Amino acid sequence: MQVSVNGCGRIGRLLIRYLVESGHTISHLNDVCSLESAAYLLQYDSVHGTWSVPVVAGDGIITIDGKEVKFTQEADPAKVDWPTEIVCDCTGKFLKVPILTSSYLSTPSACKKVVVSAPVKEAGALNVVLGCNDELLTPEHCIVTNASCTTNCLAPVVRVIKENLGIKHACITTIHNVTGTQTLTDMPNTKKSDLRRARSGMLNLAPTSTGSATAITEIYPDLKGRINGLAVRVPLLNGSLTDCVFEVERDTTGEEVNGLLKAAAEAGPLAGILGFNMLPLVSTDYTNSTMSSTIDGLSTMVVDKRMVKIYAWYDNECGYAKRMQELVVKVGGL
């Protein structure tokens, strides 16, 4: 399958890695950065390591594993001559259905499908979490999103608890590593209005918002108004943790909860997506994990039979990018 990618940031570059490693062809790359920067950062990564596949910068071309890929520097994707039926938008900037349609689907060189690396909370886009609601995908869906990294972490846990214990209410806190929306040192932040993201991301714990808890209602609409949450940005480059607290509809125990999560991780639609372990691991142990989430079984807790607390680890870059690669393949096969 041939795919084009717009946006060579953290997710875009990992997506390219996973697409190439799974035998697919990258036909076109577009970003506002220089070709040299895109090629260099695709080859070398401070967190995920040097890619074993050779990447060479050329004249308007990036050669990946011996195959030439056209590279353009265009801020407006509507001006790009996309050579493939599927384009992956990894810019994080085009999050409205009309804009996505005009940018990708209604130009003379339009593609047929766009897969977005961020949630789009409007009619006309389908937000997908693999293992949770991907059965809704049809050939008629032209704008498909991979939701968010934390939604991908949370949704499998929600599915297991919802289907087996029932959920009255839920509240989550994601302990999330730094991202490009924060500043390295204290300085005005032009990307986000949240003042706390203007403080040094390498020195502070910074409470902030997360759309993942409300976005989960895009996946499970019946939970609308019954689940919410916050985030705490922490001075780490990788390895995040979601603290999930559920008020469930029937009595349970920690042993039962772990048993349900372990069974879901081993077989069924969440196998290969949800992980489970009883090992005393820490955040760096999950760098390069391609699971959407991995349950820290040692931390599972039940209070007064009806309040359930679960820790779910995730590499918010690798796990998310791997699911996006799988989603792109699924969309291409419709």
Image (tube, rainbow, N blue to C red):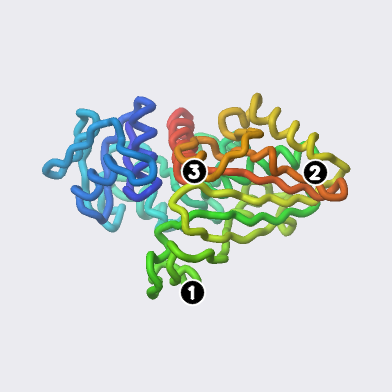
Residue annotated with mark 1: 195
Question: What distance separates the C-alpha of mark 3 from that of mark 2?
Answer: 33 Å
Q: Residue at x 66, y 34 (%)?
A: 278
Q: Secondary structure at mark 1?
A: helix
Going 57% across and 61% down the picture, which residue do you hit?
232
Within-10-Å neighbours for mark 1: few <14, some 14–19, many 20+? few
Residue annotated with mark 2: 166
Q: Quadrant of residue 160?
A: top right
Question: Which residue in the protein does label 3 denote?
Answer: 284
Mark 3 vs mark 2: in front: 3
Residue 130 drawn at (x, y percent):
56, 36
Of labels 3 and 2, earlier in sequence is 2
Local secondary structure at mark 2: loop
- Quadrant of the image occupied by residue 74: bottom left
Question: Which of pointers 1 and 3 lies earlier in the amino acid sequence?
Answer: 1
Number of numbered discs overlaid on the protein picture: 3
Cα separation, mark 1 vs mark 2, equals 37 Å
Outermost residue toward the left? 59
Q: Amino acid at mark 3?
A: Thr
Q: Amino acid at mark 1?
A: Leu
Residue occupying the point 58% across, 43% down? 313
